[in-house]
Amino acid sequence: MVSNLVEDHSKKEEQVEFYWTGHPFVDAGLAAILLIAGKSKPEELTDKDIEKVINFASELYATKEWSSSYIHGMIFPNSGILMVNPSMSKKRSPKAIAENLWSILEEFKVNNKDSPKCVLCGRFPPYMKKEVYLSVFPLLGTGGVPNFFHSGNTRGADICAHCVFLVQFMPLSSYRLSRVLIIHAYPYELTIELSKGAVEDVKMSKLASQARGFRRPENFLFHLVGEITRKIERDGFWENASVTLYYFICNNQNQLLDVIHVPTPVLRFVAYVNHVDPVGWKRIVSMGWREQPDENKFEELERERSNAVYSRLLNNESILSYFYNSKERRVNASWNLLAFYCKEVIGLDKEALEFIKSVGDRIVETVERLQDHKLDDEIRSLERAEKLYQFEAFFIRVEKLRQNLSIENPLMSFDEFARILTAYGEDINISWRTVKNLLLFRIYEKLHDRLMKFAKSEKIEELGVEENEYAIYGGGVE
Ligand SMILES: [Zn+2]
């Protein structure tokens, strides 16, 4: 590491305090500072830490790799503070950048009680030394429209020196895909955990983190969640977590932002499966691509291709049909995992689930007495039921079978029949198709071997996995 670029600052300044703000870009900068300083809380930061981080960042930012293609090209176009404006290339040096960063910190001390407060942290008066547009803070607008800010401040957004300072370090904890990825999470401990990989890559390679070659932000996130869960092995780590991905680019040509919020039940579910049944989870995820990957291909697809299971989870759409493979008539995971998903993500109550399971068991008890080809016929009619009346007809046939086979109790009472057809029909996620998926799951779980024995010679039409592409978020790029 370089020696102090600007030696006397830490001595003459008083201790500066930093805060989490809830703003993803500012918090990303704070996470970078904490990770480089090896601290976990902002109040633990000392002036020595800040000096170390300013020196670390300035050394990198002065290099061409950071300055032109990343900072100027994707985050802070024409930034004067970080000296990325092409006209400044001759004057650019670690020392000059460090001086600029220190000078923001000096502004930090100005605290006029009467002035309006920062719109991001609400603590300090706006930074006045520079106009605050997208060169200073990403995605703020170019300054070409002075009335852009509701405060009517023609000098740009009301953002304080604290927040302007912190955001300058955001490039260190961001991931560089085809855009810039910031992972913001609450509790803030999670923001640090999810940014750690980026800062570690920067320390190792002196370049921005490439997110290990991932090209899809949501795939990368799901991968990280699995990895962190397996590493931490602590119950409840994701319990009340809130995670949001900010996938953006800010340069002179484009200012684009996609916000991808990860529903908390989905986080809990993905953490749970990574604990309980990582192999089953891999099988489920594999079905989200058109081609079924082998072990090596899985990693490649995971890095590069959008996955229907991930997209559906992020869009609050059911992934029940991915829990089984109807082509091979086998289940991809255990009933317990399915039950956890139904309870946590779909919101199906335990009693309803137990009821559907018991109906599934009664169907199995009936059809398993049939000869192979008859058994195959019956299950196929359930697989192919695309309309409610076809679904109804299946139960009536099974009931007739029970009578013919002299099985003592009826398949269902009238009330149960009404319940299975209509009681879960209000919500698009919990409709009769949900029931159908659960029943098929139970049947495959119990009768896979017999069904496959017969099916070997037959080609079974693929059901369940829809072939259309899923948009994850508006206007995403490949
Ligand atoms: Zn602020």
Image: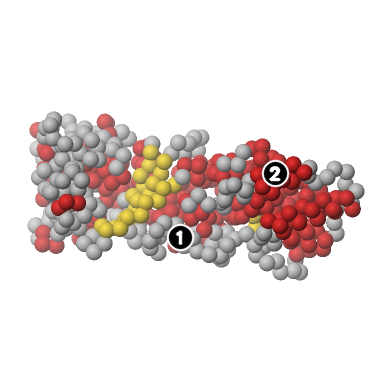
Q: Which mark is residue 19?
A: none
Q: Which mark is residue 471?
A: 1
Task: Note whether ligand 1 is within 8 Å of mark 2.
Answer: no
**Above or below, comparing residue 117 to residue 224 in the picture:** above
Q: Tell me: 110 left or right of 289.
A: left
Q: Quadrant of the C terminus?
A: bottom left
Instruction: Assess whether mark 2 and mark 1 are in contact (beta carbons under 8 angstroms).
Output: no
- Which mark sits nearer the N-terminus, 1 or 2? 2
Q: Secondary structure at mark 2?
A: helix
The one nearer the camera, 37 or 240, is 240
Rendered residue at 67%/62% (across/down): 327
Q: Quadrant of residue 66?
A: bottom left
The local crowd at label 1, few if under 14, some if 14 to 19, many if 20 or more residues have their Cα within 10 Å, is some
Whether residue 418 is visible here, answered yes or no, is yes
Reading the image, the residue beneath label 2 is: 419
From the viewer's perspective, is the residue at label 1 or at label 2 nearer? 2
Q: Amino acid under label 1?
A: Ala
**Above or below, comparing residue 466 to residue 344 in the picture:** below
Rendered residue at 68%/56% (across/down): 388
Q: Amino acid under label 2?
A: Arg
Across and down, in percent, residue 75 comes to 25, 55
Rendered residue at 26%/35% (across/down): 19
The one nearer the camera, 397 or 257, is 397
The local crowd at label 2, few if under 14, some if 14 to 19, many if 20 or more residues have their Cα within 10 Å, is some
Coloration mode? secondary structure
Across and down, in percent, residue 339 comes to 62, 43
Q: Tell me: 303 left or right of 77.
A: right
Mark 1–mark 2 Cα distance, whole angstroms, equals 34 Å
Q: Secondary structure at mark 1?
A: loop
Count of marks overlaid on the render: 2
Across and down, in percent, residue 361 comes to 76, 46
